[in-house]
Image (tube, rainbow, N blue to C red):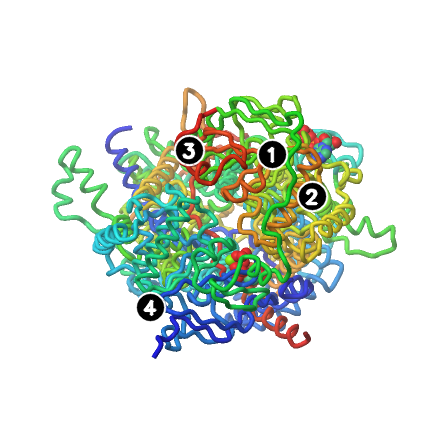
Amino acid sequence: MTKPAAIELKGISKAFGPVQANKDISISVAPGTIHGIIGENGAGKSTLMSILYGFYKADKGEIWINGKNTVIPDSQAAISAGIGMVFQHFKLVENFTVLENIILGAEDGKLLKPSLSKARRILKELAAEYELNVDPDARIDEIGVGKQQRVEILKALYRQADILILDEPTGVLTPAEADQLFRILHRLREEGKTIILITHKLREIMDTTDTVSVMRRGQMTATVKTAETSPAHLAELMVGRKVLLQVDKVPAKPGAPVLEIENLSVRDEDGVERVKGINLEVRAGEILGIAGVAGNGQSELLEVLGGMRSGTGSIRMQGAELPLHGPGSHGQARRRAHIAHVPEDRQSEGLIMDFHAWENVAFGYHRDPAYQRGMLMDNAALQADTEAKMAKFDVRPPDPWLAAKNFSGGNQQKIVVAREIERNPELLLIGQPTRGVDIGAIEFIHKQIVELRDQGKAILLVSVELEEILSLSDRVAVMFDGHIMGERLPNETDEKELGLLMAGVAGEAT
Amino acid sequence: EPALIFDLGGKFDKSFNEAAFNGAQRWAEETGETFREIELQSEAQREQALRRFAEVGANPIVMAGFAFADALGQVAADYPDTKFVIIDMVVDAPNVRSVVFNEHEGSYLVGMMAAQASKSGTVGFIGGMDIPLIRKFACGYAQGVMAANPDAKVIANMTGTTPAAWNDPVKGSELTKAQISQGADVVYAAAGGTGVGVLQTAADENILSIGVDSNQNHLHPGKVLTSMMKRVDNAVFAAFTDGVDMETGFNVMGLANGGVGYAMDDNNASLVNADMQSAVDAASAKIASGELAVHDYMSDDSCPALNF
Amino acid sequence: MDKMPKWADVVLIPLISLILAAAISALVILAIGEDPIAAVKLMVDGALGSTYGWGYTLYYATNFLFTGLAVSVAFHARMFNIGGEGQAMLGGLGAALVCLYIPWPHWSIALIAAAAGAAIFGAAWAAIPAYLQAKRGSHIVITTIMFNFIAAAVLNYVLVNLLRPAGSMDPATARFPEATHLPSLHDILAPLGIAFNKAGPANVSFLVAIAACFAVWLLIWHTKLGFEIRAFGKSEQGALYAGISPVKITMIAMLISGGLAGMMATNNVMGEAERLVLNSTEGAGFIGIAVALMGRSHPFGVFLAAILFGFLYQGGAELALWTKIPREMIVVIQALVILFTGALDNMVRMPLEKIFVTLRKGKA
Amino acid sequence: MDFLTLIQVLDSTVRLSTPLLLACLAGLFSERAGIFDIGLEGKMLAAAFFSAAIAAVTGNVWLGLLAGVTASLVLSALHGLASITFRGNQLISGLAVTMLAQGFTVLVAQSWFKQGGRTPSLLAEGRFGPITFPFADSVAGVPFIGPIYSELLSGHSILVYVAFAAVPATWWILFRTRFGLRLRAVGENPAAVDTAGVSVVGLRFAAVMICGLLCGLAGAYLATSLQAGFVKDMTAGRGYIALAALIFAKWRPWHAMGACLLFGLLQAVALRFQNIELGGLTIPVQAMDALPYILTVVILAGFVGKAIPPKAGGEPYVKER
Ligand SMILES: Nc1ncnc2c1ncn2[C@@H]1O[C@H](COP(=O)(O)OP(=O)(O)OP(=O)(O)O)[C@@H](O)[C@H]1O
Ligand SMILES: Nc1ncnc2c1ncn2[C@@H]1O[C@H](COP(=O)(O)OP(=O)(O)OP(=O)(O)O)[C@@H](O)[C@H]1O
Ligand SMILES: [Mg+2]
Ligand SMILES: [Mg+2]
């Protein structure tokens, strides 16, 4: 007799108001396997898993765990059933210590002390067993996202989860951290645990999973054995058409320097120096990629160039000096200097989530005379402009009156990119252009960036995705601890060398 | 049908408005007739209430409180056949009777009693909202204290600067405690609802207090030295009794015509000895006859006996 | 896609909430032994049944329009201005100084000047909490509450020690000169052949308030500044990205807010009392919060809500005038209206949304 | 200032701090759990009225206390219903609760006692009397220590001691117990608590009810201990001052005590030293009255810096949009 499925979902449906996030979904996952789930943004992956974890309640459907029909009204029930979940957005209390986060909800008695000491002991064992080292007394907001994810995994293991769900775990990890995560996942599988992995990265699916399910618009469209499929096939299942997985571009023809950065330093709110006297140059018609592990100063570099923070040193745009602090160093002034900026975080920076699409298309450029009529704003002109941009960038749905929050992540990103690229800037600053974006949209956004380059514009690309950096950039600079560790040409280097530079090893500092 | 309008402090403030109400009530009981009344909700309603009553034919209309003066000034001319009575303020119009009280005179008398009853030579005054009218009380009181004991010390405090000061017994209580620790052993409260806290604390701490407007001696028998009576009730009663044919004009209620005075009853009989009473009665007679003039703070905004 | 049609959101929900508030108020009236139906009749009659009633209803509504707009503008920049009361008090001082110390040839010029004076004083009173919020991060809810208390003390000092005419014991200024007296609705409507009761205090400031509604609407939805205020209110981080200065927007939004609250003085001080008295604001600053909430911070909504609260105020006054129901009843009713329309509106919305979603599914 | 005056001022500080402290700790529980509460004022007021009313009717102060606390709990439940169950705006709910209490107390007082919205004055059994420490009288004469013991420490009502004992208790509950850990977590990140299998709604209601309990004590203290009966609006803005103290204390129990003592001291000083003469210049009484408020602003602006509230504070926990 074969063992019953670790997880079996039967006919799960879930609606958020008018949005049907899951429609009659059934899957079954064998114990001791890693099961991948892929799908476009908004396909309903997170919703499905949250139902399994008792975070949302399904409108319809049954959940069977290890062959038993199990009702999961809340997360407590899911935990008792041996399910652990690492959410796309971590569920940690930021000003608590690691230890406190781990015992939260799983305390042993009414008093904290015994729980804490027991957790400390078990944590040590787990850390040793799975190479999951974290300082139990560190506060969450003091440790990096990679470590935070470890805490989430430890939380699940501490609760003795047999089934582990990971929702886009590698979106925020460095390649090394991702590799380590997958090592751990394999270990867990060997121990007989069942793992569900949601990701947008087909390579991870191919390398890690045993089976894979594809979701589209709330429905489960296919479940296949990983060994019997290919990335191209999966991509097609996901998007419903053939997708180009490689960036298609001709060699760059760099022109005159557009942006010249000299001895630029930036401090953050706490006075810590995050960018330490760097020198860089971006030329017309080239893409300069900045590689680096998150938190090594790339974000601050983008922000100071985009006018969101102040710094010291000097930056020149087409030969003209731009102020780095005080009046004239704000985002409006940068825009007037023909610098466009796609920020790293579209939801909290690039867009106002409650604004209509047309307001978001004006956002940042709302002072543009073309949008004014006398003392008032010309809202009609703006709406027309938005419709045009939405059509050109294939934003779906093409409705200028829809609030930004009601678009999927990929379409949100398209709105931001459309706004910035359509300004025809001399310099485009673009951070994490495809973070959490599905492959259909990735393909489209990459094409737009390359097209802009081919028009002779300068592009400064910051991404933690090495693959993206290598495939898009004409030149790669690696940042570590606020310094530029070195510059490489993408065809003369490989992920390994860059990985070393990103870790601060070797390379001649500039 | 006559009408009575209470000021923002409310009908049952245990002092001023309540005195007015008692006067009306007495009239109603004696005549068996009814009257209209309203407690104001806001400043803007003053004029509204006046017009409303005038329009439905209430006559006379009595209003308790100086703050009506402005509104009445606007309204009186529009209703020449209606008689208006305003208490605590003067409005010059042919159909208005203005009743003012010589609170400084009454306060002078209770000030004398305070000084005589005090063993420490320090007495207190706790006012409600810091407005000239209350300073008038304080000034008369201080003069009385000085008259009885030139070495005495008067500690005067106001509860606050907003209308909330009429209704903050907690603060009244703390002020009393503060005055006690500064040596006061008699306190005079001219503070509306705040005074309830003053009298309470004085009783708790075993010192004497003096009530105001109505007879408050009964609130803490044996602990309230006396009350400065301001016979608003008489004024209202008289107005209602005079009815539509009343004489209008300026009407001063002082010691001479029984408009102010001090309260004696069973509750405080044991506290007031014959010496005290005779001294006070003598002063009272002198003031009534004009022989003794008590300075009115509001006449020149200053007080010879007290610094504010 | 939204769950409900817009009309349901802006009309149906507030309406049901109001009915609930009214129902509970009726129960309270019943509980204290009075007749709720007679009470409602009295309120409607007294507030809306005659031009006399309208004169008062619109007068109160004018106050609430100004403070409601003030709160709304701050809301759009995500600031909770609880200081409308204090700002309106100081606005009164500004209007009084303008009216008392400058001889004006005609009321219209005086009105413009007094409105400006009131707005400047109100804005100045809002400026300090705004500055502290912008620069020092001091919570504006707390600082504006504190500034209400401080304003009361300042006004008290000024009225008692500085502006009170000699010999007067009313802590109030002298009467403003004749030339600054504003025409009442009676004066305005008479030439048009409309008979409006002479007694009601509603005056030309009502029209100013309506103009202010329109101006705020233009500002918020049709100007660059309004765009920036709304963007800042929705996302401070986003504003920074777009080059919108948080300090600047915080200051400007609060100055406008304080200015609007201050301008209430044209109605209650200049238009009605024609002198500055203590506590002339009568809590309108707090009612403005309810008005802004009920009006969903939209000028048109604020207009309707202000009329509603004007009705409640005037109706409540009539109630106190002709029945034994104490004046605090009206405070209870207001609290219930605020509770149901502002805090408990999801109680109505949640089931309603379900109904609409099912309806739509049925159709699809 | 001589030593005795100092003792008196401090004694008065203790009395005036007590309602602030109880209300401040009440707010602390609620806000630490992510529910902002500007309705402290209203709850205190309701408790003040009902404790005084029932104490007046029954002549039993303990029954009064029970009634006061119950009234405050009812309003807390209303606030919880609005802001937790129905995810309404917490500030509005707090405001409505306060207004409701302001109107309702007077309405009921008028309907029950017909004394213009106040209760009859309470007699001795209707009030919490002072608790005299052992030997208080005998050591009163000892210099320095004597007055401190007999005046400052001894002789307060039981609720004063309860208030000050509540400070370490609050600290212990918040930082040493499972409940406290969860309560703090739910104010920072309710989703974390939810996904850890603990009920957000349950925790928040518990916090709000504790808040109600403490506000009830504060109100009862005002009406049956500090005073002898209820009068309209007798809380006089104390709920707001308590909120300011809470922010000043950055939501920490011991600091809350410090802040409340400071505000109590300010009030005591303002009461005691009106019309202060400074080198011939008389500081007007209005300035002294406004002093606590001015200082609150100054403190918020100058000394506290950015007071960062619990992260999830003020926001309803919404899972499904
Ligand atoms: N809490 C919620 N309330 C309302 N609608 C929601 C909620 N969460 C998700 N949705 C909607 O449900 C749909 C499915 O969302 P879900 O997050 O499950 O997609 P996903 O496949 O995980 O997408 P992504 O790849 O972007 O993470 C989307 O249309 C989304 O907008
Ligand atoms: N986003 C834009 N795109 C094109 N032109 C712009 C843009 N913003 C401003 N301008 C031009 O610059 C002029 C000055 O604009 P603006 O008033 O915003 O500048 P500023 O006063 O320096 O900005 P701020 O007031 O934010 O300091 C405008 O009249 C317009 O012609
Ligand atoms: Mg997802
Ligand atoms: Mg400009």
Q: Mark 2 points at which residue?
A: A362
Q: Disc 4 vs disc 1: which is toward the camera?
A: 4
Q: Mark 4 points at which residue?
A: A80
- The kind of residue on which mark 3 rests is Gln
Q: Which mark is residue B143?
A: 3
Mark 3 Cα shell of 10 Å, populated few (<14), some (14-19), many (≥20): many
- Co-location on one chain, circles 3 and 4: no
**Distance of mark 3 from mark 1, alpha carbons?**
58 Å
Mark 1 Cα shell of 10 Å, populated few (<14), some (14-19), many (≥20): some
Quarter residue B69 falls in: top right
Q: Which mark is residue B127?
A: none
Q: Is A266 positioned to the left or the right of D63 in the image?
A: right
Name the chain letter of the residue that bears numbered label 3: B
Q: Which of C70 and A397 is in front in this view?
A: A397
Q: Nearer the viewer, residue C9 or A304?
A: A304
Q: Mark 1 points at which residue?
A: C248
Q: Disc 3 vs disc 4: which is toward the camera?
A: 4
Mark 2 falls on what kind of element? helix
Residue A245 in the image: above or below residue B26: above
Q: Name the residue: 64% across, 31% down.
A: A334
- Co-location on one chain, circles 4 and 2: yes
Mark 2 Cα shell of 10 Å, populated few (<14), some (14-19), many (≥20): some
